[in-house]
Amino acid sequence: MDTEAIASEIVYLKNRIAELDEESVEEKQQLHERLRGLQDQLSGAPSTGKDRGGSQADKVQYVPPS
């Protein structure tokens, strides 16, 4: 996937997450996981799935506004 496609997918996921209500917790969680993977891919960080260790500060990433 190229950078533009990844960025487009990230924007879509953020918009979809914002649309969901409190009853869609499971779908929100899945979208957040997918979003994290795309952000890692865009930043060049290795994605190791759910078992990524480290502190919360290690997981925070800067995403420039679209």
Image (cartoon, rainbow, N blue to C red):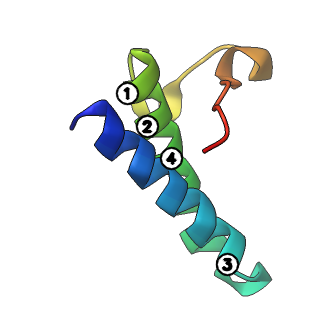
Vertical order, 18 against 47 (above or below) = below
**Mark 2, residue position:** 37
Q: Distance between the residues labelled 3 and 4?
A: 15 Å
- Badge 2 marks a residue whose secondary structure is helix
Q: Residue at x 63, y 32 (%)?
A: 63
Residues tagged 2 and 4 counted as in contact (Cβ below 8 A): yes
Sort mark 3 into few (<14), some (14-19) or many (20+) by Cα contacts within 10 Å: few
**Cα gap from disc 2 to disc 4, whole angstroms:** 5 Å
Amino acid residing under circle 1: Gln
Q: Which mark is residue 41?
A: 1
Determine which residue is flagged by label 3: 19
Name the mark nearer the viewer: 2 or 3.
3
SS under mark 4: helix
Instruction: Identify residue for label 4.
Output: 35
Q: Position of residue 36 (x, y in %)?
A: 52, 39
Q: What residue lies at 50% left-to-right and 28% top-to-bottom? A: 51
Residue 50 in the image: above or below residue 18: above
Closer to the camera, 66 or 40?
A: 66
State which tag comes first along the sequence, 3 or 4: 3
- Quadrant, the C terminus: top right
Quarter of the image where one finds residue 19: bottom right
Q: Which amino acid does label 3 sit on?
A: Glu
Amino acid at pointer 4: Leu
Q: Are marks 3 and 1 in contact (CB under 8 Å)?
A: no
CA distance for labels 2 and 1: 6 Å
Query: Which secondary structure, mark 3?
Result: helix
Answer with mark 3 or mark 1, whichever residue precedes in sequence.
Answer: 3
Q: Find out whether the residues at labels 2 and 1 contact each other: C-beta distance under 8 Å.
A: yes
Residue 31, placed above or below residue 2? below
Q: Does label 1 or label 4 sit earlier along the sequence?
A: 4
Q: Distance between the residues labelled 1 and 4?
A: 10 Å
Left or right: residue 3 compared with residue 26? left
